[in-house]
Image (cartoon, rainbow, N blue to C red):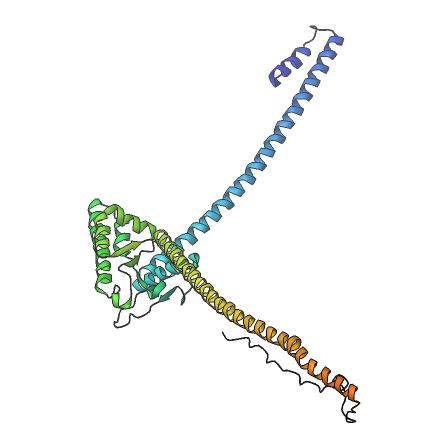
Amino acid sequence: MSLALAGALIVASRRPGERQDGAKDTLETLVDSRVAEMRTDMNKVSELVRELEKDRENKFGQLTEGLKRVGETTSLLATTTVQIREALANTRARGQWGERMADDVLRLIGFVEGINYLKQATVEGGGSRPDFTFLLPQDLKLNMDVKFPLDNYMKCVESETPDDEARFRRLFLRDVRDRLKEVVTRDYIDPQQRTLDYVLVFIPNEQIYQYIHEQESSLINDAMANKVVLCSPISLFAILVVIRQAVDNFSLEQSSNEVISQIRAFHNQWDLFIDQLNRVEKQLDSFRDGFKLLIERRRRALERPLARIKDIQEERGLSLPADAGHPEDREEPALPELEFAEPRENGP
């Protein structure tokens, strides 16, 4: 029931002569109850509005705080971007950053400097110094240079007109070709130094590497014709994984060959040992046979004349000297103990 209807009922209830007192009281009571209910509903609505307003203020405060953090992050990102661009504007800084990217790839694969690769090692017999030299089996080497042509690429990306974009694109591709020529003219490929027939050129940015492929694929073919392999961080990772697997397989093969060689040497020594053992066994058998002959047959042959002599003495009553007697009654001298040399641990 609306407030207008309640007011109308109150006015109608106060007109004299139209209703009796009892009905008038009942109507006033009904109106009062309806007004009380409406007042309660209005209070609830007011409370709900206040809660919504409070929640709106909280949400607005959170939104404001979030926008403030986003603004701070954007400002920090813009500052960092400016610092990066200023740093990369220097050619030396770009080269160091590219070498750091290559170091990260090598560390991810598990290469160790001084064992799997060398940095800035001067080529023997020349003045060239590749950024990285990978050490391969059989004293082979693979050289790699880091190149980061960025200036004209950034101008091409930020160009506002198609003409400017085309012009800076040509300049960028020319820069890439110049870097490749620098690598080709150096003695990074030298059979006398046991290098492979290819050299790697590392471009430490996937976007730039992809841009080269998209804009001028002939540049990649020309590089391959000159035995130069362009690689990005991902492709360098793949190439070095193959190299690492080849090195591990070669090391395993070398270890297997060495083990097989040692087994063959053991068999040779074992055959010599068995042959010598058979010889000693034969000598021992001959010694046992001779000793057995000495104990049995020769001893009996010597005892027979002695027994006959004893019988003759007894028959004729001959006496033996005081210190003489039966050979078995005399104390036998102690035989000297034989000393055996300790076997040597080392030797054939």
Please tell me whether residue 285 is drawn above or below residue 63 in the rendered image: below
Name which residue lies at 34% across and 52% down: 235
Residue 337 pos. (x, y %): 66, 83
Observer-nearest of 289 and 305: 305
Please tell me whether residue 292 is drawn above or below residue 77 in the rendered image: below
Observer-nearest of 326 and 255: 326
Name which residue lies at 23% across and 54% down: 223
Quadrant for residue 295, please give it: bottom right
For residue 143, side relative to residue 318 (left or right) = left
Q: Classify the position of the N terminus by image quarter.
A: top right
Please tell me whether residue 140 is drawn above or below residue 203 in the rendered image: below
Observer-nearest of 7 and 241: 241
For residue 217, side relative to residue 337 (left or right) = left
Asked whether residue 135 is in view, the answer is no
Labels in figure, total: 0
Asked whether residue 219 is in view, the answer is yes
Observer-nearest of 326 and 238: 326
Q: Of all residues shown, which one is farthest toward the front? A: 316
Please tell me whether residue 258 is drawn above or below residue 221 in the rendered image: below
Residue 247 pos. (x, y %): 39, 59
For residue 47, side relative to residue 323 (left or right) = left
